């Protein structure tokens, strides 16, 4: 239950922010929060996170659904039993669902967080990237921990 609440919280924060931006700003409008460092800039991104891959909206809908299905399978098989995978799973699934909702509702993804030195992004993009980063770190340390455990077992057998 807390997993679903976490996913719904990410979706809620993402969608409320995007709906507010779209309702209060003109497309292309930019408002400085910290001049030349951080702006709120309203764009609609038909591409991937950070505008890197120029595929069709249909392709990204299929990719998002695939990520969501794989995320659910991952949750059911691994993350449910491993508390360290709980938070990154919430972030990845919540972010993927947030952007999927945009693609279906608007036909592209609403982006607005503008650091001026990085492509404009949104809360869902942030959640997915942070979740993936945590998952990668977890996997790196988990593998290292397994090697140390194996070496310890070998030392004890000598």
Image: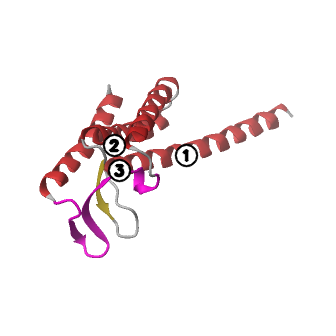
Does label 2 or label 1 sit earlier along the sequence? 2
The x and y percentages for residue 84 are 48, 37
Indicate which label's residue lies in the foreground, 3 or 1. Answer: 3
Disc 3 from disc 1: Cα separation: 27 Å
14 and 54: which is toward the camera: 54
Specify whether residue 82 is in view: yes
Give SS at disc 2.
Answer: helix
Indicate which label's residue lies in the foreground, 2 or 3. Answer: 3
- Residue 29 lies in the magenta-colored region: yes
Q: Residues within 10 Å of mark 1 (few under 14, many from 20)?
A: few
Give SS at disc 3.
Answer: loop
Indicate which label's residue lies in the foreground, 2 or 1. Answer: 2
Who's the residue at 55% across and 46% down the image?
Answer: 136
Q: Which residue is mark 3?
A: 46
Who's the residue at 34% across and 60% down the image?
Answer: 120
Q: Which residue is mark 1?
A: 136
The answer to whether mark 3 and mark 1 are in CB contact below 8 A is: no
Is residue 108 positioned above or below 5 on the image? below
Disc 2 from disc 1: Cα separation: 22 Å
Q: Which residue is mark 2?
A: 99
Q: Residues within 10 Å of mark 2 (few under 14, many from 20)?
A: many
- The quarter in which the C terminus is drawn is top right
Answer left or right for 141 relative to 111.
Answer: right
Q: Which mark is residue 66?
A: none
- Where are the magenta residues, as a range? 26-53
The x and y percentages for residue 7 are 33, 35
Residue at the limit of the structure toward the right, as seen here: 158
């Amino acid at each position: 239950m807390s997993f679903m609440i976490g996913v719904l919280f990410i979706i809620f924060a993402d969608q409320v922010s995007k709906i507010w931006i779209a309702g209060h700003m003109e497309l292309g409008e930019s408002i400085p929060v910290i001049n030349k460092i951080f702006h709120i800039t309203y764009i609609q991104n038909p591409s991937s996170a950070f505008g890197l891959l120029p595929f069709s909206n249909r392709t990204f809908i299929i990719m998002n659904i695939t990520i969501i299905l794989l995320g659910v399978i991952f949750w059911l098989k691994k993350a449910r039993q491993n508390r360290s995978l709980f938070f990154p799973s919430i972030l990845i699934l919540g972010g993927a669902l947030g952007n999927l909702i945009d693609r279906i509702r608007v036909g592209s993804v609403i982006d607005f967080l503008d650091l001026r030195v990085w492509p404009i992004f949104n809360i869902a993009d942030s959640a997915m990237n942070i979740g993936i980063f945590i998952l990668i770190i977890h996997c790196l340390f988990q593998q290292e921990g397994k090697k140390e455990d194996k070496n310890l077992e070998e030392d004890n057998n000598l």
